[in-house]
Amino acid sequence: RYVFFLQCTDFVKAGAEQGLTPSDVVLAADITFSCVADPQAAKDMVFGNCGVLTEISPDKSYVEMTGIDAETSQDIAEAINGKGGRYLEAQVQGSKTQAQEGTLVILAAGDRSLFDECQSCFEAMGKNSFYLGEVGNASKMNLVLQLMAGVTLAALAESMALADRAGLQQKDVLEVLELTSLACPAILEKGKAIIEGGFPTQLPLQHMQKDLRLSLGMSDQLEQPLPLAAAANEVYKHAKRLGYGEHDASAVYIRARF
């Protein structure tokens, strides 16, 4: 019921109590959930001044829900466990709409007893939760899925750009696509966003590019070639440089249209 957030007015109105620092929240709560922008922000939250680690003790638990790489998660786990606390990584799959509807898919790894204790919270956030074993496995699974999503969306953007250049109606492309085996909610949703041109933010483009970058980092360590992911990452990077980082990931279409 305690929150530490840059913009937490709505949470406070709903009954939460605000902590001034991450350490304040940990001190007041038995289990602390964290979901910030990226690996560096996650590490700053734990290791920074007045950070989480300051107040972690054997009766405290920490759940990291930020989209991070396995190494960052393992570093945080080691620090939390070193002070006697319990740690669970709980990556989420889903959009802003699914978060609001409580239909996310949660991928967890780490302390099994903490996973079991968090079920009531996970049920409020998502429709399914999976326990994947040791710390790092959930981060790896999330990056594998994000790689699929990122490359697929880049391909959709290029296809729609090609259709437009060829003189085809994009709405016709989407109507036909909906009747084929390629049709799925994600592709249809992003296709409509491309046609409408508003790109309302469900998943920020900069976060999709971050996940592709982390996937490529994982592939480097494993010596697993990812040529399509590497090419898609460059497209997202360019779209980000054009100023679309905070728009929805479907704004990659702007870059594909060039």
Image (tube, rainbow, N blue to C red):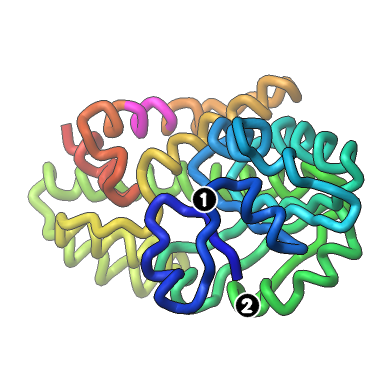
Check disc 2 and report its element: helix, strand or loop: strand
Give the distance between the C-alpha atoms of the residues marked 1 and 2, in whole angstroms. Answer: 32 Å
Give left or right: position of 121 versus 12: right
Apparent side of residue 15 relative to residue 250 in the rendered image (left or right): right
Near mark 1 (Cα within 10 A), the count class, few <14, some 14-19 or many ≥20, is few
Of label 1 and label 2, which has the lower sequence position? 1
Image quarter of the N terminus = bottom right
Q: Position of residue 235 (x, y in %)?
A: 34, 30
Instruction: Give the side of residue 234 with respect to residue 115, left or right.
Output: left
Q: Residue at x 24, y 60 (%)?
A: 193
Q: Single out the mark in the foreground, 1 or 2.
A: 1
Q: Point out the image quarter for the C terminus.
A: top left
**Location of residue 120 with respect to 251 vertically, above or below:** below
Answer yes or no: do the residues labelled 1 and 2 have beta carbons within 8 Å?
no
Where is mark 1, residue-wise? Answer: 20
Q: Is residue 93 left or right of residue 163?
A: right
* Residue type indicated by callout 1: Leu
Q: Which residue is painted at 24% across and 44% down in the image?
A: 253
Secondary element under disc 1, as helix, strand or loop, is: loop
Stretch in magenta = 233-237
Residue drawn at x 33%, y 66% is 189
Which residue is tagged 2?
Answer: 127
Main SS type for the magenta part?
A: helix
Occupied quadrant, residue 223 = top right
Towards the viewer: 206 or 254: 206
